[in-house]
Image (cartoon, helix red, strand yellow):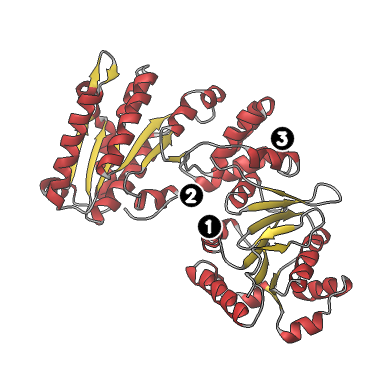
Amino acid sequence: MATPSNLTDCGLPGIRNIPYGVHMCHFYRDRDELAAVLVPYFAAGLRNRERCIWIAAAPLDAAAAKLALARAGVDVDAALGDGSLVLRDFSEWYADGENLIGAAVVDFWLAEEARALADGYAGIRISGNVSFLTPETWSVFMEYEDRVQKAFSGRRIVTLCTYPFDGCGAANVLDVVNRHSCTLEHPDEGWQILTRIPA
Amino acid sequence: MRKDHSRHASWQELLASPSAGSHILQIYDNDDFVASGVAHFAAEGLLHGEAVILTGTEAHLRAVRRELLAKDIDYEAAVGRGQLSAHDVRRNAEAVLRDGMPDAARFEAMSTAALEKARARGRFSGMRWWGETSNFLLQRGHPRAALALEDLGAAAAHRHGAAMLCSFLLDRFDPLAYDGILKQACCKHSHVIPADDYVRFRLAVNRAIAEILGEIKGPLLQSLLSWKGLACDLPSSQALLFWIRETLPEQFNPVLARVKAYA
């Protein structure tokens, strides 16, 4: 039996392969910029036979995300029907804000990975749009990002966290990039990966 | 003393449960912050069954004692059972200096005696030491001696598994300090507490940077990501100021002036 590849297609022009276990972040300005990164990212995940879990939030909610995927040629109904795509609004996904904080959320993702692998998927591909934070919940969520960064390393999980520029000051940007493997940037037609140099 | 604070969210959390061997810098510009920070550090240690050593000026020791009493800590009882001890910073400085510089052997003897006594044959579950001897030297015009003493303090904290907190009176709004004592002091410590109110400081830094530099994207984001940073845990707000000083020096003074105005 062939060993599964540790690399997978990111789906974004200019970036070809990314390793499983990667925990990426991206800052967007508006709904179009958000769709421009998440639609090809998930379309590639479905092509790669990864279970895709999209936790949507304003300005691109689950209904709008479904339309955007369909416009890109994804058979959304079939993917939702066979369980390869899970697409839900943040408000529905986390019924209680306190669920955000614990190691339980990380354990949940690891269980999802195991379930997907048992179902024959190559891994899981996740994205959460982090547009719901307030100054009061910021540091708690950063602790969660720290946990994810440590726990997902080496797993068959690809993660992309998207943050709106609006509401993210410079210190917030530094907090976020310090807690991810890399940052996706879209300076021109193509995409690029920026990585942090550790101190 | 258990939690790994690779990135701390608040000074209260950091000082409540510092990891053994950590060497924390508290930057202050008013005495109230020293008293509240040190009292929090000491009270949490006492409540967790750890030994606490305080080395400070008479005024600061009095203020810390007041704060501990306000937290319902029985100060005298803690002293009586050997869990808490207070020492005069001037005498401490005199004991470790030789020809104006800290003497490693003298410091080793002094710190080992104090920490072994505090350890009390394992009666206490850990050790915390707050000191301002380096600051005492700095305020008297001896920055080299102050920084050399920090090296000895860090080594002692590591060797004895104690958590050490140092308080420094520094002006974080002085542009010159970013190339000198502020940066050097940060680099001598494992964690830095740059301000009393983290949220206010963060908002001030965010606002100043947004006004002067704009959004952190494109080349600015690339620059930030490729910046090596300081080898200590300090809040992003303070780290960004060091980044601007190093990579965008012409923008630094206007940014810092606005941070000062907004903080």
Image: B254 above or below B237: above
- Find residue A186 and report its horizontal and vertical position in percent: 79, 51
Residue B212: mark in rendering: 3
What residue sits right under mark 2 in the picture?
A: B7
As shown in the figure, which amino acid type bears the numbered disc 3?
A: Ile
Circles 2 and 1, Cβ within 8 Å, touching? The answer is yes
- Find residue A33 and report its horizontal and vertical position in percent: 81, 58
Q: Quadrant of residue B108?
A: top left
Element assignment for label 3: helix
What residue sits right under mark 1 in the picture?
A: A146
Can residue A152 be seen by looking at this rendering? yes
- Could you tell whether A142 is left or right of B35 in the image? right
Q: Chain of mark 2?
A: B
Seen at 35% across and 36% down, the residue is: B166
Residue farthest to the bottom, as pictured: A81
Q: Chain of mark 3?
A: B
- Find residue B50 and report its horizontal and vertical position in percent: 23, 51
Image: A129 above or below B129: below
How far apart are the alpha carbons under marks 3 and 1? 30 Å
